[in-house]
Every structure is written in C-alpha cells, then in structure tokens.
Amino acid sequence: MRLQQAVQAEQVARLTWRQLSTSFRAKHQASQIIEAEAAIGKAQALVAQTIRMLMQETEAALAEYDSALLEWRSLRETIVPQRREQLRLVEQQFAAAAIGGSLPELLSARQSVSEAELQLAQAKVQLWQAVAGVEALLQIEIPPPHEEILTVPAASP
C-alpha cells in the first residue's frame, strides 16, 4: 500500500513534468518545469525509501516467524514429550510406592508438564501472530507449515 502510493506520486510528478516540458509555452514555464523535476526527484527518493523500509520490515517479520516456529517445534517435539515421559515415570513409581515415588515429586512432575504445555500454547500464539504479521505486511495468506499446528497434542494416558 505504501509502495503503491509512493509510485503513484512519482507517476503524477512525471506526468506533470511531461505536460509542462512539451507545451508550447515551455520557455514561460521554466520555473514550473524545475519544480516538476524536483517533485520527480522527491518522489523517486520516497519510492526508494519506502522499498528499503518494506524490505527491512519484511526481514524482521520473517525472522520473527522463523524464531516462533523454531520455539514451537522445540516445545512440541522435545520439551513437552520429555516432561510427559518424566511424569509417566514418576506416576509409575508413585503407584508402585517405590523408593523415590513421593507425592511432592508427583506434584512437581505434573506442574512441570502443565508449565511446558502452557509454554507450548503461548508459542503457538506467538507463531500465529508472526504468521499474521507476515500476511499483513505482504498482503498474502500463508498456509500453515504443517497441519499439526492446528491440532492440540494429546496428553499421555
């Protein structure tokens, strides 16, 4: 949108310059021609500045997306499963009343799983916010990288 406005401003300045420079009264309109040429220069500078700014914003948005995706994948594929496995082992020890299978350990393991699942949910929110940011900036719709983003992982039995 911003680039389109800058390009339109440049086109208007060029059209004005062409109209002035090709008229029969060009000698009498020399100051207007100079003004039109200055307007073209300003419009070209605005276009270049807008392009640089949009490129920087795009790079930042894509970096944020990449970071959010990595965080989400790490939590989903490694951290949450590890915490669930730790909880499963503590539950087994607690159920068997084995040495080291204490109630505080069980509660701590459950809390650890809950915290990891909360982090996973927050990472998912950040991922979708990053997707929305890239979509808004590029004015396109980005499909999710995997259908698994749309699903909630099942808790271990």
Image (cartoon, grey):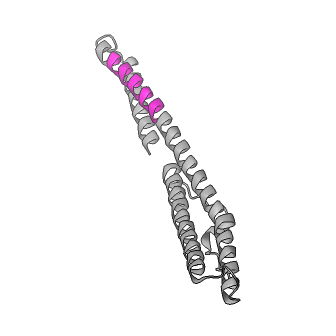
What span is colored magenta in the figure?
Answer: 33-50
Q: Is residue 3 above or below residue 77?
A: above
Q: Residue furthest front?
A: 99
User: Is 100 in front, or is 58?
Assistant: 100
Q: Quadrant of residue 14?
A: top left
Q: Is residue 18 above or below residue 60?
A: above
Answer whether residue 34 is magenta in the image.
yes
Q: Position of residue 113 (x, y in %)?
A: 59, 74
User: Is 11 in front, or is 62?
Assistant: 62
User: Is 12 in front, or is 126?
Assistant: 126
Q: Quadrant of residue 69?
A: bottom right
Answer whether residue 79 is magenta in the image.
no
Horizontally, residue 77 falls left or right of residue 120, namely right
Q: What residue is drawn where x is 53% and y is 52%? A: 134
Q: Quadrant of residue 42?
A: top left
Q: Position of residue 44 (x, y in %)?
A: 44, 27
Q: Residue furthest top?
A: 27
Q: What residue is drawn where x is 61% and y is 61%? A: 72
Q: Position of residue 117 (x, y in %)?
A: 57, 71
